[in-house]
Structures are given as C-alpha cells and as structure tokens.
Image (cartoon, rainbow, N blue to C red):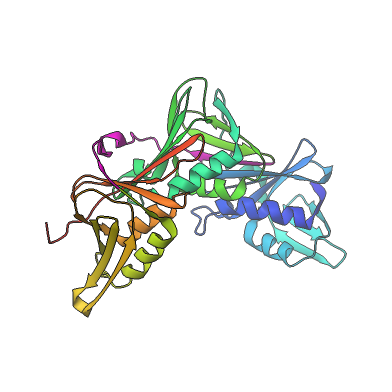
Amino acid sequence: MKFTVSSGELVKSLSAVAGAVPAKATMPILEMVLFESEGGKLKLSATDLEVTIVEYVSAEIEEEGSVAVPARRLLDTLRALPDIPVSFSIDERYNVLFKTDKGSYRLAGEDGDEFPATPTLDEATIIETSTGLIRDAIAKTSFAVSSDDLRPAMMGVYFQIGTEQSKVVATDGHRLVKLTLNELKAEFDINFIVPDKALNLTNKSLDSLECQISVTDQHVSFKSGNTQIIARLINQQYPNYETVIPRDNEKTLIVTKDELLATVKRVAIFSSSSTRQIRLRLEADELNIKAEDIDLSSEAEERLTAEYSDEPMEIGFNARYLADVISNVNDSEVKFEFSTPNRAGIVKPAEQEPGKEILMLVMPVMLNTY
C-alpha cells in the first residue's frame, strides 16, 4: 500500500477517529487505526467494539491495500509536523514507513484483515436531518444521562422518532430532560437508546451541515460529510418517563437565568459537602436561596427579585443538579412550576425556541422542616 496525504488533513481525521480508541484496550489491535484505500480516498477506522468512527481523507493512492497503524504514536508525530505532504509505504510485513522533506519515520503495523470489521447497516431505517439539530439535541440532553451500571437503559439518550415530531429524553433519576423536536421526523415511528459515549463523540466529530441517521435493531449510525459514527444500541426497555412528570404544578416562578445560576453556585459553596442541599423559599415577588453546613458552622443566604404570586413555599434541591438544569435553559428567564415541596419541580425557558420545546425536571430533597 502506498499513498501521499496532507499531514494537516490526516491529523484532523486521526484526531476524530482517535476518540474511539480505548485508553486500555483488551486487544492490542484496538489501539490502532485501520488505514484502507476506498474509492480513491483514504479511509480511517477506529473502534472499541462498542463505538466505531470512520473518516475519509483525500489522498493520492498509488497502491491499494490496508494496514492497522498505532494510533497515538502516529498522531503525536504528525502533530509535531507542519502542514506538508507525507508519503506512506507499507511493506509485506506491515511495517509503515512515512517520509516528509524533513525526514523519515517507521512504525510496526498489523495486517488490516485482523482489525475488527465495521458493523454493517443493512435494511436500516434512514432519517435525514441537520447536523445542527442533532448536536443541539445531544447538548441539551446528555447532562442528565445516568452513570449507574445497574440501570443500563438510562446510560444513554432515548430517541422517540415519530412521523410528526420526535422526543429526545435523558434521565438519571434525579433530573430528567425531554426535548420535543418538530423538524425531526421519520416515515414511521422508531425508538432507540444511544449510549452517552457515542453521542459525545458524535457531538465532537460531526461538522457538515447535513446528517443522515441510520438505525437497525442493533446499531445506529450518524453520518455527516466525511465522518461516520456507528454505535451499538442499548438493548433495554427505557423507563416510562411520562409517569414521573407532574401534571398539576400550578405554582409558577419566573426569574432571571444568569442571576439565578450565579446565586445558586455562590450559595452552594456553603452547603454540606455530602448532600449539596440548598433551600428555595418562594414568597411574593421574591426568591430566597439558602444553604448551610452544620459541621463547619457556615451558611449563606441571598434574595432575588422574581415573579411569584402564589402562597409561600419552601423546597430543597441538590445544588449541582439544579445548576445543571438551569444551565441548559436557552432563554434569559427561567420558568419553574411547583406543586408541593415533595414533588418534582418542572423547569422550562420562559419562552421556547421555535420548533423546539424543552421540559426539564429536578427531584427535590427532603428538608427537615417538612
């Protein structure tokens, strides 16, 4: 196999696929990137057996072939070079020699046929959408994905693709986010759970305008431009999240987002390191936020102007969970909907984005004043 490629273009593509290279591989070949010639281009593939990333790079292919190359050492070497042409040649023992006008370098490769095969997506359901829409959906939901191995279904984002609109959902039992997208549609209803790692890599790697989603019983693919991410789906039943969303939260609080977020973060510094509990006291046109750490004899309290006209109420939250939810409101004002201190609080932007509707909820923590 022989080819010449721009070091800058190769570094960009290698950096993208390297996200799928495991830090501690169970098989040595998984620490490598597969180089193949395909359709007059250079095809790069990396996998951890759960997520596969494929990149296509423009190159001058002199001899067809394939080889698996150590990912980290090659990438570190190319990053130290200026953007210049690099010529690669691979011998019959899969030694990789690459040359520039500065010098030559040699790496021991492996037979490309030994590299794990890329999953096929035969008879997949195809969904055409925009990359921006998918990246936005990932950004708005991934913060609420669970890391609990005992609840594998919640370790991913749940996609409910419909014929009229779609819902993208994530929850860890403490927080929940449901994003409704009017522009994401399919010819028929299809539901699937994508692992969090695959979505994070998708969010980082896709940069073209259009995105094609392909879904089979076992895998999902996000393809945009020269990049494709293929992930094994989480084959579990997602919990019935609709049952935990309160329907009668009639107490409404509206407050400035940036001011609220800054206050929560400041006050949280004085909360207990074990519970991270803060108290929200709702009164007429006022929000009082308080935290205390009895063990360290410390406390903090701040007042904010807010829109609230219902009866006074006090409710407790984990400060980190509350801050995460507030951070993901894309509006200058946050709208809270409450019922009682022991039921989840609903969080929304005061004004929704066109074609999108986001609903988040955060579970309360028990206060000793109940």
Q: Which residues are magenta?
A: 226-252
Any part of residue 276 in sight = no
Identify the residue at horizontal 62%, vertical 50% (top origin): 17
Image-based side of 209 in relation to 326, left or right = right
Which image quadrant is residue 156 in?
top left
Image-based side of 103 in relation to 29, left or right = right
Magenta stretch containing residue 292, yes or no? no
Q: Nearer the viewer, residue 47 or 364?
A: 364
Q: Is 272 above or below relative to 89?
A: below
Q: Position of residue 136 (x, y in %)?
A: 53, 44
Image-based side of 38 in relation to 103, left or right = left
Q: Is 237 above or below relative to 321?
A: above
Which image quadrant is residue 113 in?
top right
Identify the residue at horizontal 41%, vertical 65% (top origin): 262
Identify the residue at horizontal 55%, vertical 44% (top origin): 135
Magenta stretch containing residue 233, yes or no? yes
Quadrant for the C terminus in the image: bottom left
Q: Residue furthest bottom?
A: 297
Any part of residue 88 in sight = yes
Identify the residue at horizontal 47%, vertical 32% (top origin): 218
Q: Residue furthest right?
A: 101
Q: Position of residue 352 (x, y in %)?
A: 45, 41
Q: Nearer the viewer, residue 227 or 104?
A: 227
Q: Is 271 above or below relative to 285?
A: below
Which image quadrant is residue 269 in?
bottom left
